[in-house]
Amino acid sequence: MRGKRTSSFPPTRISSRSVLEDLGRWLHHHRPVVVALSGGVDSAVMASLAFQYLDSDAVAVTGVSPSLSQQERQAARRSADAVGIRHLEMTTDELSRPGYRA
């Protein structure tokens, strides 16, 4: 038998307030930040939190290429507009990389 555990996993209770406070401290420590905004929920939430904590020190960026659907591009634009975060679109060319298609 292995040594006695001193803590339980998964934790029995996580405070969402403490997680957000930790995230806010992390963002402030790493400012300015760029959030990759894909048009999905996860990146939209991160963009919103980054803008909430950092205001103009947070920027959202969407990589635009044939692998990004128009629906995803529009969703990213709508998310950025709703949040108020500055949003840049950058053309990418990942399809030209042999390892990307593999």
Image (tube, rainbow, N blue to C red):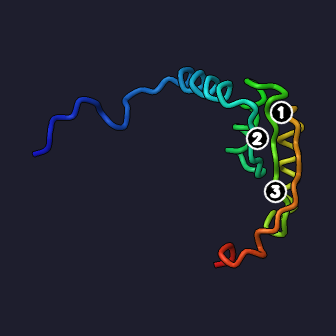
Q: Position of residue 47 (x, y in %)?
A: 75, 37
Lower position in the chain sequence, tag 2 or tag 3: 2
The reply to whether discs 3 and 1 touch (Cβ–Cβ < 8 Å) is no
Q: Residue at x 73, y 50 (%)?
A: 40
Is disc 1 placed on a helix, strand or loop?
helix
Is disc 3 placed on a helix, strand or loop?
strand
Could you say which quadrant of the image residue 97 lies in? bottom right
The amino acid type found where label 3 is placed reads Gly
Of badges 3 and 1, the one in the foreground is 3
Q: Residue at x 78, y 29 (%)?
A: 51
Alpha carbon of mark 1 to alpha carbon of mark 2: how far? 14 Å
The amino acid type found where label 1 is placed reads Val
Is disc 2 placed on a helix, strand or loop?
strand
Residue marked by disc 3:
63
Could you say which quadrant of the image residue 17 lies in? top right
Tell me if residue 37 comes above or below residue 102 in the rendering. above
Is 55 displayed left or right of 97 in the figure?
A: right
Mark 2 nearby-residue class (10 Å; few <14, some 14–19, many ≥20): some
Residue marked by disc 2:
34
Alpha carbon of mark 2 to alpha carbon of mark 3: how far? 12 Å
Point out the image quarter for the C terminus: bottom right
